[in-house]
Amino acid sequence: QVQLVESGGGLVQAGGSLRLACTASATGNIFSINVMDWYRQGPGKQRELVATITSGGSESYADSVKGRFSISRRSAANTVYLQMNSLKPEDTAVYYCHADRIWYGRTFNDNVWGQGTQVTVSS
């Protein structure tokens, strides 16, 4: 069994910063994780892709967060981060961590999601 656990959400004023973290754990050693992403779902909105980082470290971002958010990962710790700066009220959402494939033990899981962490930005 494999899971992703997010942390770091909370309430912040507009213009402030937060850093989210997401750590993968499994029954058995994790050998590799391919692409890791952060998604978010705001009130009354569809879930949207925020940022992506590949196993090689290539990054991509939604236009709405470019220049403000930064994704990074520590592969040795099976952890991905999302540094969020210059936060706006429209960034308010539940933020979800996602991995396309996690290899662990003698098997793998595809399309793994975390439980989400709430980020609220007040004006």
Image (cartoon, rainbow, N blue to C red):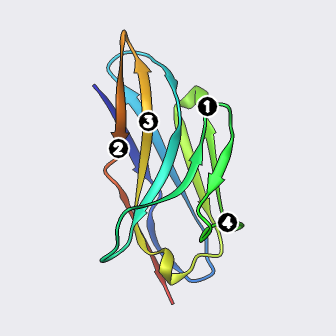
Crowd around label 1: few <14 · some 14–19 · many ≥20 (10 Å): few
Asked if marks 3 and 2 touch (Cβ < 8 Å), the reply is no
Name the residue beneath numbered marker 2. Answer: 113
Q: Say whether residue 48 is left or right of residue 27.
A: right
Rounded to the nearest whole Å, what is the CA distance between mark 1 and mark 3? 11 Å
Name the residue beneath numbered marker 1. Answer: 55
Image vertical order of residue 114 relative to residue 95, above or below: above
Q: Earlier in the sequence, mark 1 or mark 4?
A: 1
Q: Earlier in the sequence, mark 1 or mark 3?
A: 1
Residue type at tag 1? Ser
Residue type at tag 2? Trp
Asked if marks 4 and 3 touch (Cβ < 8 Å), the reply is no
Crowd around label 2: few <14 · some 14–19 · many ≥20 (10 Å): many
Q: Is label 3 or label 2 in front? A: 3
Which quadrant would residue 46 be assigned to in this image? bottom left
Q: Earlier in the sequence, mark 2 or mark 4?
A: 4
Label 2 secondary element: strand
Which quadrant, please, contains the N terminus? Answer: top left
Disc number placed over residue 66 in the picture, else none? 4
Residue type at tag 3? Asp
Crowd around label 3: few <14 · some 14–19 · many ≥20 (10 Å): some
Label 4 secondary element: loop
Disc number placed over residue 87 in the picture, else none? none
Name the residue beneath numbered marker 3. Answer: 100
Which residue is at 59% across, 26% downward? 76
Rounded to the nearest whole Å, what is the CA distance between mark 4 and mark 3? 22 Å
Asked if marks 2 and 1 touch (Cβ < 8 Å), the reply is no
